[in-house]
Image: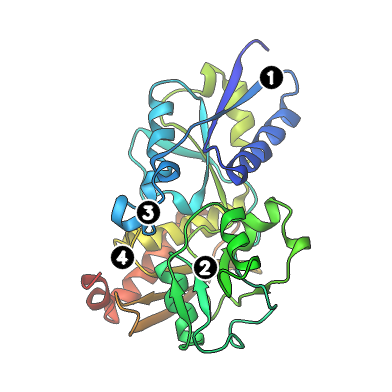
Amino acid sequence: MKATLRIGSRPSKLAIVQAGIVRDAIAAALPALEIEIVPIKTSGDKNLSPSLADVGGKGLFIKELEAALAEGRVDIAVHSMKDLPAVLPPEFRIIATPPRENPHDALIAQSGASLTSLPKGARLGTTSPRRKFAALRINPGLEVVPLRGNVDTRLGRALSGEMDAVILAIAGLKRLGKLAEIKYEELDEREFVPAAAQGALAIESLADGKICGSEEIDRAVSSLNHPRTQCETTAERAFLASIHASCVTPVGVKATHIDDGLAMRAILFSADGARDLAEEISQRVAAGDARTALHLGQALGAKMISRGARDLLDGI
């Protein structure tokens, strides 16, 4: 096989590890295929402003990768799915969603304290409004400090004592092999609802044509799709789209396969975190039935809107 598959990735250690997971899976299916990971620095990597919202939002982590796809410099791009907008431009597609890693958040404190046992005035590092308001809902005495940077940087600021604690996604810690090195509290998803698609990867390609012009390569990449993960993330992203959530919306949503059904829970905070609205929904959804999952996510969004979510959203 003469073609070389070029995988676009952000240059961070975690992003390269995630691209490597996809590379290895494709190589197992097509051992003769040459595969190259192409690091591409995004605006989000270059601009370290404490607030993503101030410099353009989560789209900063994907626009250069999509430009590379459009210009033919890479054939696929691997993203943390939570960085993708809820609706992609029509020229791109998510060709596969590999199996999801643990979607929960973790609290890491140098002292080993839990979220509830952190003392009044303890400095908690996070730039996520969702994490900030969820943490303050559980422990109102915290001082939340903006914190950006890669996983090692944020983890280091907690373990050095510069921050009393930080909140990070378990998926990233696990993929980087950090969990065995630290004490952490896995935050319960009912009280600390994760971000949509947290823990999931998305393999993105152009919507038109086969990858590298090869049906065999296109089929091999498509085969990495995990039906349960696809359903969960489809429902979660449909919910975000239905309420017109943006990168600054303090919202969490998690869909979970239970037996032959899909159960969803979402929480939305007001702009100042003073109010919140939580809602749940469930329905029978077979693994792989992405269309029904999409409708379930839309139904949860409609349910939230009917209960007054628009009042919270309009203030954001």
For badge 2, the amino acid type reads Pro
Q: Nearer the viewer, mark 1 or mark 3?
A: 3
- Say which quadrant the N terminus sits in: top right
Q: What is the spatial separation of the Cα atoms under label 1 and label 2, in whole angstroms? A: 37 Å
- Residue 300: x, y in percent? 39, 71
For badge 3, the amino acid type reads Ser
Please name the residue that numbered disc 3 is placed on.
49
Q: Residue furthest top?
A: 2
Secondary element at image label 4: loop
**Measuring 59% from the left and 35% from the top, which residue is drawn there?**
222
Secondary element at image label 3: loop
Q: Nearer the viewer, mark 1 or mark 2?
A: 2
Disc sitting over residue 33 in the figure: 1
Secondary element at image label 2: loop
Which badge, 1 or 3, is on the more N-terminal residue?
Answer: 1
Please name whichever residue, 180 or 202, is drawn nearer the observer in this view of the structure. 180
Which badge, 3 or 2, is on the more N-terminal residue?
Answer: 3
Question: Are the residues tagged 3 and 4 within 8 Å (C-beta)?
Answer: no
> Dot 1: few (<14), some (14–19), or many (≥20) neighbours within 10 Å?
some
> Dot 2: few (<14), some (14–19), or many (≥20) neighbours within 10 Å?
many
Please name the residue that numbered disc 2 is placed on.
194
Please name the residue that numbered disc 4 is placed on.
243
Question: Are the residues tagged 1 and 2 within 8 Å (C-beta)?
Answer: no
Which badge, 1 or 4, is on the more N-terminal residue?
Answer: 1
Secondary element at image label 1: loop
Which badge, 3 or 4, is on the more N-terminal residue?
Answer: 3
Which badge, 4 or 2, is on the more N-terminal residue?
Answer: 2
**Measuring 41% from the left and 81% from the top, which residue is drawn there?**
278
